[in-house]
Image (cartoon, rainbow, N blue to C red):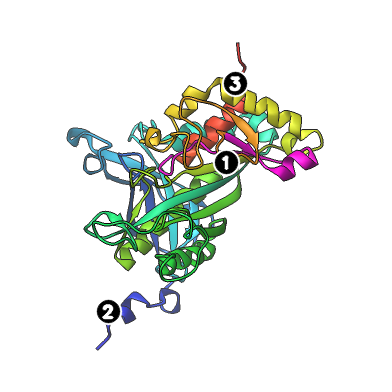
Amino acid sequence: MALLTDLINLNLSDYTEKLIAEYIWVGGSGTDLRSKARTLPGPVTDPSQLPKWNYDGSSTGQAPGKDSEVILCPQAIFKDPFRKGNNILVMCDCYTPQGEPIPTNKRYNAAKIFSNSIVEAEETWFGIEQEYTLLQKDVNWPLGWPIGGFPGPQGPYYCAAGADKAFGRDVVDAHYKACLYAGVKISGINGEVMPGQWEFQVGPCAAISAGDHLWIARYMLERITEIAGVVLSLDPKPIPGDWNGAGAHTNYSTKSMRSDGGYEVIKEAIHKLGLRHKDHISAYGQGNERRLTGRHETADIDTFVWGVANRGASIRVGRDTEKSGKGYFEDRRPASNMDPYVVTSMIAETTLLWQPN
């Protein structure tokens, strides 16, 4: 008699040309991920080879019950680390049957910005630092914390090792390897300042692909925490008080910034970001006001300030960038639950297309 694990681990490519495609999309809250699977007759190499599909949008908060069909359009393909073989994960965006993007489809507007000839010529690169918190199931309390109590104060936990300092490393390492297997451009991981909190970095990714890669990385993290029996939180301030929040610092550069004389281009871009500070804050994630307090490595939400090597600034420029006179900068304002399509395209639009009055 076959065991359940034997059936789960079956390598379909040994027996059939057919494969399983997991269609993934962003749900009605703008932060939840949904997915459903379908069988395909054989391997595919490009999203254009995949059929469109549909789902019941009334069950995800994205359509009324009397007209509930939402269309899934495949946009990016990744290898499936859960089913392995030729099976794939498919990042999709969502449209009405008439072909109009639904309100929660943030990829559509981002694609328009990144396809602008001015933006394309500047070859935008992004690197996103996704912080997150692992919670104990059913109690909504960070992993490794005594239930109803608190660990020792922050200090020993950042990039730490040890059973009393690092909680959830098995989940983190499983996710790291799953991302590499899938083809996600994950560039590293580390333990964060608050115990039970971790970070992974995605990038550098060009243009809209940064959003595709981050959403797929988030999806896989949801699946891995599901297997491990822990809960993933992207809340920007999961524990009130004297504990660090969780952000999604977004590193950015253009061709001009990476070229000789790029430091002046960087300073002009930062000036523009400062002029539109309120617009960016309003789009940088829900609950961010609980995180951006001017403490715990943040600038106050109502203040825009930039500096070299300053982790208490809105925008941080690295020492290497200052020294070489070219490179990139880091927008430290986005919350951990931000939409990467929104944040990356808004940074590109403000720095490359928007002109102050």
Q: Pointer 2: what residue?
A: 4
Q: Which residues are magenta?
A: 315-338
Q: Which mark is residue 276?
A: none
Residue 332 in percent (x, y) is at: 53, 38
User: In this image, 67 relative to 327: left or right?
Assistant: left
Residue 287 in percent (x, y) is at: 36, 36
Label 3 Cα neighbours within 10 Å, binned few <14 / some 14-19 / many ≥20: few
Residue 48 showing in the rendered view:
no
Label 1 SS: loop
Label 3 SS: loop
Residue 10 in percent (x, y) is at: 37, 78
Q: Is residue 314 above or below residue 248?
A: above
Residue 137 showing in the rendered view:
yes
Q: Earlier in the sequence, mark 2 or mark 1?
A: 2
Tell me how far mark 2 sits from mark 3, CA to CA. Answer: 56 Å
Q: Which mark is residue 311?
A: 1
Residue 276 magenta: no
Closer to viewer: mark 1 or mark 3: 1
Q: Pointer 3: what residue?
A: 354
Three-letter amino acid code of the residue under disc 3: Trp
Three-letter amino acid code of the residue under disc 1: Arg
Tell me how far mark 1 sits from mark 3, CA to CA. Answer: 27 Å
